Structure formats: C-alpha cells, structure tokens
Image (tube, rainbow, N blue to C red):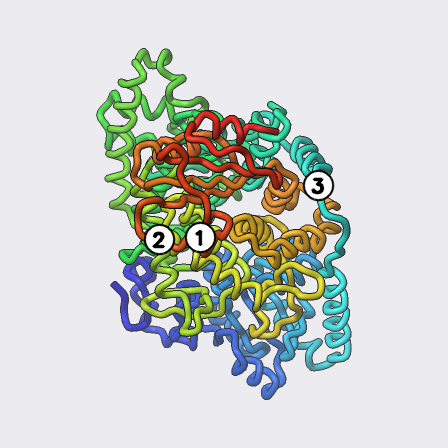
Amino acid sequence: MSDEYGHSQNEQTSESADQFKKLPNRLIREKSPYLLQHAYNPVDWRSWGDEAFEIAKKENKPIFLSIGYSTCHWCHVMERESFEDDEVAAIMNRVFVSIKVDREERPDIDHAYMTVCQMMTGSGGWPLNIVMTPDKKPFFAGTYFPKHSGYGRIGLIDLAARIEHLWLSDRAQIEGASEKVLSALNSATEHSSGETLGLGSLKTAFQQLDQRFDPNFGGFSEAPKFPTPHNLVFLLRYWKRTGDQHALQMVTKTLDQMRLGGIYDHVGFGFHRYSTDTQWLVPHFEKMLYDQAMLAVAYTEAYEVTNRVDYKNTVQEIIEYVLRDLTSPDGGFYSAEDADSEGEEGKFYVWTQEELQEILPKNEANFVERAFNVFKMGNFKEEVTQSLTGRNILNLKRPLEELREQFNFSETELQHIWEKARKRLFEIREKRPHPHKDDKILTDWNGLMIAALAKASRVFGKKDYATAAAKAADFVLANLRDVNGKLLRRYRLGEAGLSAHVDDYAFLIWGLLELYETTFDPDYLKISIELNDDFIKRFWDKTAGGFFFTADDSEELLLRQKEIYDGATPSGNSVAAMNLVKLHRITGSMELDSMVWSMSRAFSGLVAQFPSAYTQFLLYIDFLVGPSFEVVIAGPENHTETQNILHRLNETYFPNKVVILKIIGEEDSGIASLAPFTRDLGMLNNGPTVYVCGNFTCMSPTNDPEKMVSMLKIN
C-alpha cells in the first residue's frame, strides 16, 4: 500500500507524524525511496536534470551534489544532523543549487563522481558529496559532513561559507581547480591494453589473496571486513585447477566464520552488509539483495566441492529470507533493507538477556544464552564510547552440531530446541518496528538473484527455486524493457524508467543463461542472445574493446568510463566477459569469439598490476585457459536416463562448461537454430546420449553418466 506520493507503509510509520505538516520540496515527485526520504528536508533539493543546471547558471551558483541510497546508515545520520536542520538549509539554499541522486538508480553518476572523490581525497563512500560548477566540473569532494566543524572534519555550515567566498571572490581559482580535476580524471581512467592474460595472473591473484588472508577468522582484510564472495568463487576454481588445499581452506574458513558470526542473521536469515570488526561479530546491519545473491552462489559452489550440509542449509536460508522479505507479489526482487529502525542502527536485530528470559522457556533461554554468547552486559561495544551496550548480537563460536557434548543433547535434540527457540524469537521480532525496505526493483541486482536461484535449483534439485527465478526473469523482461526492446533500470510503484547500464545487461544475461541451463527453456537462451546483441551494439568500445558503463545514446557525463574493478558487486565487464565466452561456445559466433579475446587484451594492463582486485574477471580467464567443455545431452526431457545424466552433472563441481539439452521426441524447440552445432546430434542405442567437447576436441558420445564424468575430469 502506498500514498499518493509513493511512500510505502513502512516508510510512513518510520517518519514522524509532524513531518507531513512541512511543505515538501521537489523530490516529492520522484519514485526513488532515497529521494523521497529527503522530500521534506528544508534544503531545496532538486533531482538530477537539465533544469537544475540551467537554474545554477542563471542564478550563478555552484552545485552541491549529494549521492547516497535509502539503506545507508551514515546518509541517515547526515540527513538528521544537517539536511533536516533549518540553519544548514538556509545557507545551502543561499549558496548552492542542491541536487540529490540515488546511487542505485544512477550508478553512472555515482561512478563518475566517486572516482573524483577517491582521486581528490584518497578515499570514498556514502554519503558522497561533490561541489561543482554548473557545467558539472567538480572542484571539491567529501563524504560525511556534520553541521559544525570538529575532530578534523569540516562542517557543512563552514564549508558552504568558504565555497561562497571563493565562488564570489576567486572564480579563476575554482575554474583552474576543476580543470586540473578533469585532466587528472581522464588520465586516471585510461586503461592500458597488453597481452592476453593467462595462468600467471591466476597464480598471482592466489598469492595476493593468501598474503591478505586472516587465518583466524577468514576474509581478506582488517576491519571493516567485507564478504567479497567473488574472491571465494575464484579460489574454488583455483583449487579445482591446481589441487592446492590451502585455496580451499581459505574458502571454507571464511564461509564458516561468516556463517557463525553476527554478520549472519541467525533468527531471520540472510547476511548483513559487512562486519565492522575482524571477527564478523558486529555488522553494518543493512541487508542488500546483491549480497544475498552472490553469497548464495559462493555457498552453493562450496557445497558442490565439499558436500557439506551446513553450506546447503545456508543457501536455503538465504533464499528463504529473499523469498519471504525481498520479493514483490509480481516476482521481482526488492533492493534492500535498512540498518536502522526507530532511529538506531541494528535495534531490530539485537537482544538483551532479560528479553530472552522473558520470551523463551527456561531451558531454551539457557541454551540460546550459552550457545549464542549472550551476556547481561551485552556482547558488543557501542561504537563511539566503546562501552558495553547491554544488548547482544547472536553469534556462535562453534557450529551448533559441535555443541552436543556441551549440552548433552543428541544432534536431533539440539536442532529441535534451537529451531523451536528461533521461531519464537522470529515471531517476537516481527512485532518490532521494521527497518525501512527499499522496494525498488533493479534490473542488475535481479539478474544476480536469478542466477543464484537457478544455480541453487539445479545443484540442490529444488524446482521451486527455478520457478522463483523464472517468475523474476519474466517480470523483468515484461516490465523493464521499452517498446524497442532496450533494457530499463528501475521499476517502482508500477512505473519503469531510467536507462540501463552495463551491469543491467551483463547481470541479467548471466541470470538468463543460468536459468536456461536449469530449465532448458530455449526462450531464455534466445532472449539472452537478443539482449547481448543490443548490448554489444550500444555499449561495446569498437576501438579498444570492452564495454562502456553507459550506452552510446546515454547522457554525457564527465567521461565515458569502463569499469573492471570487482568491488561490492562484480563489475559489468567481468560478468559480460564470461557471458561472451558462454554465448560463443553455444552459438559458434565468430564475432563473439573475437570479442572474447579482445576483452582480455583490453583490460590486461590494469588487471596484471594487481590481479586479486579482479577475481570475477579472472573466472573468465580461468575458463579461457581451460580445460572447458561444451556438454550436449540429447534425449527426451523427462526420460529417467536424461534426468540421471543431468543429476550426475549437477552434483559434481565442473564450473567451466556450457550445457545444452536437445530434446528428442517433441516438437522442435528451436535449439538447433540457436546452437547450430547440435543440429545433427541424436540418440545412440535409442537412449539419452551425452556429447562432450573440450579444448576444441570432441570425445565419443556415451549413454553412461559415469563416462561423461570421466571426460569432464580431464585436466
């Protein structure tokens, strides 16, 4: 349910009643939950567009550009301290034309100006605040600004006053500074090409990850510590290639510690954004769709390697959370849940010892307190004062099954008592005021979740996961394409809009390819090919190779960038590179083959400098180096032997492959027109047959699933 301005119910309940007595600013007309959060600020915010820049030129004012997102904790803090303050608003309205941007809606703007901030200050993050000329040329950058200066951080009132003085008295200095920024920006974003990357880059990336690895708690940094699941997926492939057990140990240690820690929501499932400490105990409590998707992929692949049931359970719990709390009635996936509720970060998720004793029977309360490290004084410290809070983040020091002797329970009894207590805690927690939910549906993050669901469906044999993935894909394809078939980026409250970027195309194509290999519905393969054709036409750099972040008909910003760094999410180019490889192997297109090799050369100079920063891109390099396989199964789809072959294929870890099902005995599905090399492949001995080709060589077809596995184990 929403009001006429597009506020969802949980937005309204989180806002004070007297807020709506204030006059709204121009952001009230927007769809973005983040922009709507600022719609009642006294700051005269405008959305990004020609009108704002024309006003700035007309009124001779600099632009104050503020970028954030709806579940950003420090964005909320800055809003409360500064943007809701009448004194701050007065000076901002006098000095600036102020523009608000949702980074999740406009990652093109965010990427451009985040690069500026990192270059000017040496760091970045959100909120991201840029001061620039009406011609979009930046000359000052920073992140969080309090109202008043202090502790080495300039306050917004002082900043505005200094900018005003410079703007009116020394414009030449500002213009000179902005030109230097643009010149440095162009130099910093140039990609050097070189030789095709190979085994050496894979080994170097492994060594660099090993040097950064935390042997005690897993992960690859000090605090703050991020999950970076693409690092783990890369290490699994490195283990597969080399047999190096340490690569696998780095993966399992990290996955284990994250699952035990407070970064995991033990009551309601799903992972929080990152850990503020090295032990994964105290998270930044927001939950992002992309983290759920990529971590589900990592735990699924780790299960394929280890067959550990706890990894399977973790994936199923992540998916339960997403389907329960982040799924729209129409099947698309919402973006995120906030860290804050009732004006406080994490309040929704933490417990006092007294609460647990009141809520649970004595034996269950005792179990939860001891197993999940609950104390009367609390188990984590307040960020500023570093004093204990009296509240507890549920976390485990050891897996539950290892606590049997401590509690004198059988494994069945232990699981039963925890599940009973967990359900009760979940019921109680659901009655608390919930964190704000960002209910916009983004094409790229939906693509990631579709890929994760499809992969989990075939590995765990859960058809309902494939059903959910297909429903989401159908929703995106029906609602987030314009009349010409071009992708759009954002859907909210019945309205789709905003031009798609590289991530939207790359991630959705990945999701559709995974969905095809799970359902073998050729329509998903056909659409992925069509989207990839449009993607190439509008985003491909015909001179140097690789994909630009924006299309050739998109708004012109500071520069047209090409992203390759694999950060919180994989880069669009990293995912697109793998898509190109797979689509080439399926279609046999020589144009795609040329692009496949061009991708490696286009970014090789940058990747070679520090390969571990590009681990998703290295998955594509790993596929290119080989061995990699094309597997075609020819047979009736529902035949027992066909399903046995598929089951045997899916239960074993063979990451570098494409799989095609040529259905025999039914109407022509059209797969031969999409994958011409399958045209003459039929059944041998009147039974479902497997054709395996690897490293440009095809092996003898077989009806035996075990022979198929032997062929795929050739190294």
Tell me whether the residue at label 2 lies in contact with that at label 3, contact meaning CB atoms closer than 8 angstroms: no
Say which mark, if any, is on residue 668. Answer: 2
Residue linked to disc 1: 672
In the image, farthest residue toward the bottom: 58
Percent coordinates x, y for residue 504 in the rendering: 49, 59
Q: Is residue 145 left or right of residue 283?
A: right
Q: Amino acid at mark 2?
A: Asp
Q: Amino acid at mark 1?
A: Ala
Residue at 45% from the left image edge and 24% from the top image edge = 397
Task: Residue 256: tell me if it is visible.
Answer: no
Residue linked to disc 3: 198
User: Disc 2 on helix, strand or loop?
Assistant: loop
* Label 3: few (<14), some (14–19) or many (≥20) C-alpha neighbours in 10 Å: some
Name the foreground residue: 272 vs 451. Answer: 451
Quadrant that contains the N terminus: bottom left
Q: Amino acid at mark 3?
A: Gly
Q: CA distance from mark 3 to mark 1?
A: 33 Å
Q: Earlier in the sequence, mark 3 or mark 1?
A: 3
